[in-house]
Image (cartoon, helix red, strand yellow):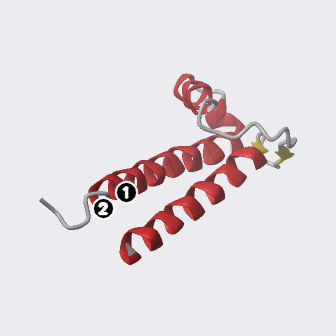
Amino acid sequence: MSARPLRPVITVLMNLLVIVAVIDTARIVVSFFGALAATAWGAALIKVTAYTVFPLGAAAIKTPYGGGFDVDAAVTVVALLMAEWLLSVARNRG
């Protein structure tokens, strides 16, 4: 038995947070370019990631590429990465 039984659980949580942050980053890129958001897979990605983005109500910033910068997704990515960092600190100190 490990001396730190929560260490593997924290590691799994950290990995999940990074995966969700990467998927939400893909949402930001697809939303930024309107041509990507208009494709079937782009629309599907935006629809699926709607469940992982915090609904803060910030309006998207229009881009010259026909899309919009998704502020809610950007704030979510920052929050997820901060949470991952805090978990890594807790894992390393615990």
Horizontal and vertical percent position of residue 68 = 78, 43
CA separation, marks 1 and 2?
A: 5 Å
Q: Is residue 65 toward the left or the right of residue 27 in the image?
A: right
Residue at x 53% of width, y 67% of height = 86
Residue 14 found in image quarter: bottom left
Kind of residue at disc 1: Ile
Graded by Cα atoms within 10 Å as few (under 14), some (14 to 19) or many (20 or more), the crowding at tag 2 reads some
Query: Toward the viewer: 3 or 14?
Result: 3
Query: Toward the viewer: 5 or 57?
Result: 5
- Relative to 92, residue 66 above or below: above
- The residue that label 1 is drawn on is 10
Residue at x 51% of width, y 68% of height = 85
For the C terminus, which image quadrant? bottom left
Horizontal and vertical percent position of residue 71 = 77, 49
Kind of residue at disc 2: Arg
Q: Identify the element where label 1 is drawn.
A: helix
Graded by Cα atoms within 10 Å as few (under 14), some (14 to 19) or many (20 or more), the crowding at tag 1 reads some
For the N terminus, which image quadrant? bottom left
Task: Check if mark 1's residue and mark 2's residue have beta carbons within 8 Å.
Answer: yes
Horizontal and vertical percent position of residue 23 = 51, 44
Q: Is residue 72 toward the left or the right of residue 13 in the image?
A: right
Residue at x 62% of width, y 48% of height = 29
Q: Is residue 17 toward the left or the right of residue 47 in the image?
A: left
Residue at x 25% of width, y 58% of height = 5
Query: Toward the viewer: 46 or 40?
Result: 46
- The residue that label 2 is drawn on is 7
Residue furthest left in the image = 1
Q: Identify the element where label 2 is drawn.
A: helix
Q: How many marks?
A: 2
Residue 8 found in image quarter: bottom left
- Relative to 77, residue 82 above or below: below
